[in-house]
Image (cartoon, rainbow, N blue to C red):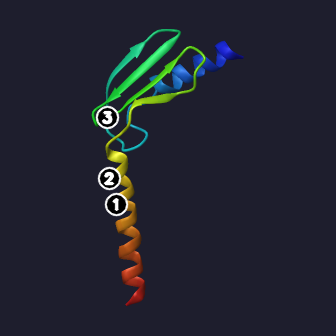
Amino acid sequence: MNKRLTAVRIDTLRDQSNCPACGAAARVHSGDQASFTVLFQCGSVFDVRGGTPISYLTPCPGSSAVAAAHLERQAEAKAIAAN
């Protein structure tokens, strides 16, 4: 199971053409059968090594922008609903 899960994790990262947090395009995919890393244009880096879960090495700076935009949409909707 562990080798299969590692392979699926690597395939999952390999298939990422955009940052899962902000949607920025992938710049670099690198790895082999035991590890894989993806660098995105936003600067985030996602990685899997051996039997470890997929993780980020560098967080996406855009995720805060996405969260702020979401909050702004909520505020705008409340303002419109109040009129």
Picture coordinates of residue 58 (x, y %)? 37, 31
Q: Which residue is mark 2?
A: 65
N-terminal of the two: label 2 or label 3? 3
Q: Is residue 39 left or right of residue 46?
A: left
Q: Are marks 2 and 1 in contact (CB under 8 Å)?
A: yes
Q: Which residue is mark 1?
A: 69
Above or below for 80 versus 40? below
- Outermost residue on the right side: it is 1
Which quadrant, please, contains the N terminus? Answer: top right
Residue sitting at 58 percent across and 21 percent down? 52
N-terminal of the two: label 1 or label 3? 3
- The quadrant where residue 14 appears: top left
Above or below for 19 versus 72? above
- The quadrant where residue 38 appears: top left
- Outermost residue on the bottom side: it is 83
At label 3, the amino acid type is: Ala
Q: How many marks?
A: 3
Instruction: Classify mark 2: helix, strand or loop.
Output: helix
Q: Are marks 1 and 3 in contact (CB under 8 Å)?
A: no
Residue sitting at 35 percent across and 51 percent down? 64
C-alpha separation, residue under disc 1 versus residue under disc 3: 19 Å
Instruction: Classify mark 3: helix, strand or loop.
Output: loop
Residue sitting at 46 percent across and 27 percent down? 15
Q: Which residue is mark 3?
A: 25
Above or below for 61 versus 65? above
Q: Is residue 52 left or right of residue 21?
A: right
